[in-house]
Image: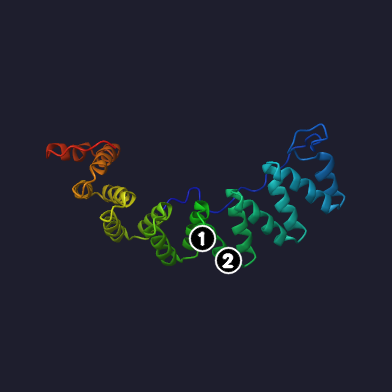
């Protein structure tokens, strides 16, 4: 499984450059961090004013202010407020806030709460929460739990869960089981499962079997699937296998 973008480690908040006044009635632009507000009020111990200023800038789209706000909440012992704010941002579609909220929940020894929240978000259609939960369970060495849940989601029609299930099963050394499951799904008409099966067959050095998988599905009345097979196999560098259906007199329909 590729973990390049899912290690859960957010970059530390960058230093915020000094800026001009930021509120709409000042000389700065909407969303800038007020030098005359947040920086000085925090230094003077006026925490509430600093929080209000950072919150204002963060909710106007300033990324630096977002992390400064979270940092300030933690610094003054108000991590719960940071989590609450991040969760609200995450539920509004902020991916980074979702990752950070989970990180803070884990640091607070509330991992099960994070899992419950992510599962609920995923089951409501949040694909980012689904991916984050998959990674979290994997990191906790609970891959089997993740696979069982993902497969159930996939069999209910969730294509994102299907992709994560395949990824996790393959990562844990279950390629043959994965291919068998995908082919069974393909035989029920699940085209996404079929494409994943072909990808894994090619990845594991079984391009011939990949072609047969596509052919068997095409014989069930899906010529569009055969066309996808030919295009996919060509992109994977298996030109000979891609031409085999034509040599057998089988012509794909239009996609």
Query: Does dot 2 land on a helix, a strand or a loop?
Result: helix
Of 4 and 239, nearer the camera is: 239
Q: Is residue 111 left or right of residue 25?
A: left
Identify the image quadrant of residue 241.
top left
Query: Does dot 1 land on a helix, a strand or a loop?
Result: helix
Q: Distance between the residues labelled 2 and 1?
A: 9 Å
Q: Is residue 9 left or right of residue 186?
A: right
Residue 136: which numbered mark, if any?
1
| Farthest-out residue, top | 27
| Farthest-out residue, left | 248
Q: In this view, does 46 lie above or below 148?
A: above
Of 190 and 196, nearer the camera is: 190
Q: In this view, does 99 lie to the left or right of 166?
A: right
Q: Which residue in the structure is indicated by mark 2?
A: 111
Q: Is residue 26 left or right of residue 98?
A: right
Across and down, in percent, residue 255 comes to 29, 37
Residue at the (58%, 66%) spot, across then down: 111
Q: Residues within 10 Å of mark 1 (few under 14, many from 20)?
A: many
Across and down, in percent, residue 166 comes to 37, 55
Identify the image quadrant of residue 168.
bottom left
Across and down, in percent, residue 33 comes to 76, 40
Residue 216: which numbered mark, if any?
none
Residue at the (52%, 52%) spot, across then down: 128
Are discs 2 and 1 less than 8 Å apart at CB?
yes
């Amino acid at each position: 499984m590729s973990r390049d973008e899912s290690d859960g480690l957010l970059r530390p908040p960058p230093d915020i450059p000094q800026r001009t006044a930021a509120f709409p009635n000042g000389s700065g632009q909407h969303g800038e961090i007020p030098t005359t507000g947040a920086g000085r009020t925090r230094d003077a111990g006026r925490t509430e004013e600093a929080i209000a200023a950072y919150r204002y800038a963060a909710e106007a789209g300033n990324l630096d202010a977002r992390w400064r706000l979270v940092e300030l909440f933690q610094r003054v012992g108000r991590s719960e407020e940071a989590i609450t704010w991040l969760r609200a941002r995450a539920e509004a579609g902020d991916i980074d806030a979702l990752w950070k909220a989970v990180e803070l929940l884990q640091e607070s020894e509330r991992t099960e709460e994070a899992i419950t929240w992510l599962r609920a978000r995923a089951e409501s259609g949040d694909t980012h929460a689904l991916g984050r939960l998959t990674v979290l369970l994997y990191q906790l060495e609970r891959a089997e739990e993740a696979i069982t849940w993902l497969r159930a989601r996939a069999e209910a029609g969730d294509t994102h869960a299907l992709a994560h299930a395949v990824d996790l099963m393959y990562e844990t050394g279950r390629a043959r089981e994965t291919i068998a499951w995908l082919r069974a799904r393909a035989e029920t008409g699940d085209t996404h499962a079929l494409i994943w099966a072909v990808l894994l067959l090619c990845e594991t050095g079984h391009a011939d079997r990949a072609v047969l998988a596509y052919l068997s599905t095409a014989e069930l009345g899906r010529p569009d699937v055969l066309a996808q097979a030919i295009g996919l196999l060509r992109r994977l560098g298996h030109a000979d296998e891609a031409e085999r259906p034509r040599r057998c007199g089988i012509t794909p329909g239009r996609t």
